[in-house]
Amino acid sequence: TYYRHHRYVPHFYRYRDHSANTENLLPEVANPEPVVPQPGMPTYPEIPEVFHPEPEVFHPIPEAFHPVPGVVHPAPEPYQLPEVFQPVLDASSPVNANRVFYGIMFDAGSTGSRIHIYKFIQKDPVELPVLDNEMYHAVKPGLSAYKDNPEEGGNTIRQLLKIAKKTVPEEDWKRTPVVLKATAGLRLLPEERANALLKEVRGVFDESPFFVPNNSVSIMNGAKEGVLAWVTVNFLTGHLYSNTRRTVGILDLGGGSTQITFLPKSKKTVQSAPPTYIAQFNLFKNTYQVYTHSYLGNGLYAARLATLGALGAEGLDWKVFTSSCLPKKFREDVTFGGTTYKVSGIPDGYAGYKLCYYEVMKVIKGIVHQPYEVKGSSVFYAFSYYFDRAVESGLIDGSRGGAIEVRDFKKRAKEVCNKMTKYRAVSPFLCMDMTYITCLLKEGFGFKDTTVLQLAKKVNNVETSWALGATFDYFRNLNIH
Ligand SMILES: Nc1nc2c(ncn2[C@@H]2O[C@H](COP(=O)(O)OP(=O)(O)O)[C@@H](O)[C@H]2O)c(=O)[nH]1
């Protein structure tokens, strides 16, 4: 369990120019959509839509964007106007009296379930609530592993809820919303299996003392997953401010799916993209248009199976799936999404980077779209398994993260594959994973060798995941379409 204490107040307050245009301090919300109150539904301060101006040329990562543990906020430039967390000016709101409120977001991923408990502080009814800290805990495996035993799956969520009860003060339980969003693991399951798991979780929520909103347990679609991660990362890096005209793209590599999201600066990117790859949502006064796509089946674990030719295969009892990406003498059972497969290296064959590259290409070629613009010099934040594999292969330090170039993945992939015995202790799949990441970035998305990837697990002590964006979305619907 990680308890992350960090304060966001300073970056709003320190850099806030109080003589600034008050129109911006109290923005008129475009399309104010009244929330239809449900019986017993508590009230919260409204998290506003966040303004974002026209994008301009991306810059190389300034020093200040490097996640420095313990630093409150990188503050790449003086902030003038707070744009996030605009409170509702309602003196009768119970929140204004209490000044603290919480949000509980569950991430039911294909390889694990995680709870995020966010604490927000409303300092003053006319000031901004701020994100005070996040409490995070993860369990493995993910819900989909319990496809034949949903009750047990529900138990993993029940366990995580115990942490929420310890973290959120009892007097706040009733008005603290609890929400679970499932990603690729459940998307990949047959519908009735996924529904049984969701139903079980709903039961667990209903028996909890927290506030259970309508539709609090659901499978999130891939576009939303990408957009919400983009919102999280750009919020945490201080890019969602009216005077900050740059944003960063995000690359998320899960177990079952992978997402790319960025704000195009060229019209051609939008025009040449498949229409479903362009998503719009409102951020403060602007409608925001991003390139986003989630590739289901192209997450790291699903890609392993696809490379082995095992995904969706029959006759699993006797079949052994082989690959030249694995050490020759390796043989093991691997389980993903509740199904077990026998896999091995090719004992009397060849193993190594080149052969492996051809194998993983099958999973990418003709599947992954190359956005017009990724050949430019945009900055991308890469997290989840991009981060984990970069750490395991020694490219970056796990406690600090860091910036690397796409070609660094390639160089290290070659090294790992050509010296499999050396890296076998780290993971027998490291060659396959590193080669897949290289191939996805270069042949899939079409990144240049020199594209800089900022690898981060946390930014300013908050997990880089879609969960924070999803919490904002709950408090103030971003209206993604
Ligand atoms: N740091 C961090 N990593 C996360 C979080 N949630 C998921 N991950 C990472 O995401 C990867 C797995 O993604 P998962 O959700 O299981 O796959 P998906 O279902 O395909 O999206 C792993 O590398 C996890 O460590 C989070 O909140 N914080």
Image: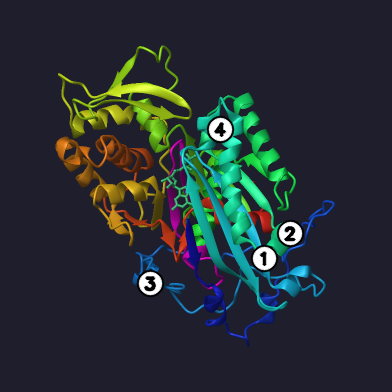
The CA distance from mark 4 to mark 2 is: 30 Å
Dot 4 beta carbon under 8 Å from ligand 1: yes
Seen at 38% across and 72% down, the residue is 64
Residue under circle 2?
175
Horizontally, residue 145 falls left or right of residue 472, namely: left
Answer whether labels 1 and 2 touch (C-beta < 8 Å).
Answer: yes
Residue under circle 1?
101
Per the rendering, the mark at residue 64 is 3
Report the amino acid beneath label 2.
Arg
Helix, strand or loop at mark 4? helix
Using the image as rendered, state which of residue 318 and residue 91 is in the foreground: 318
Quadrant hosting residue 199? top right
Answer whether labels 4 and 1 touch (C-beta < 8 Å).
Answer: no
Seen at 25% across and 42% down, the residue is 426
Helix, strand or loop at mark 3? helix
Mark found first going from the N terminus, 1 or 3 = 3
The CA distance from mark 4 to mark 1 is: 32 Å
Report the amino acid beneath label 3.
Ala
Mark found first going from the N terminus, 1 or 2 = 1
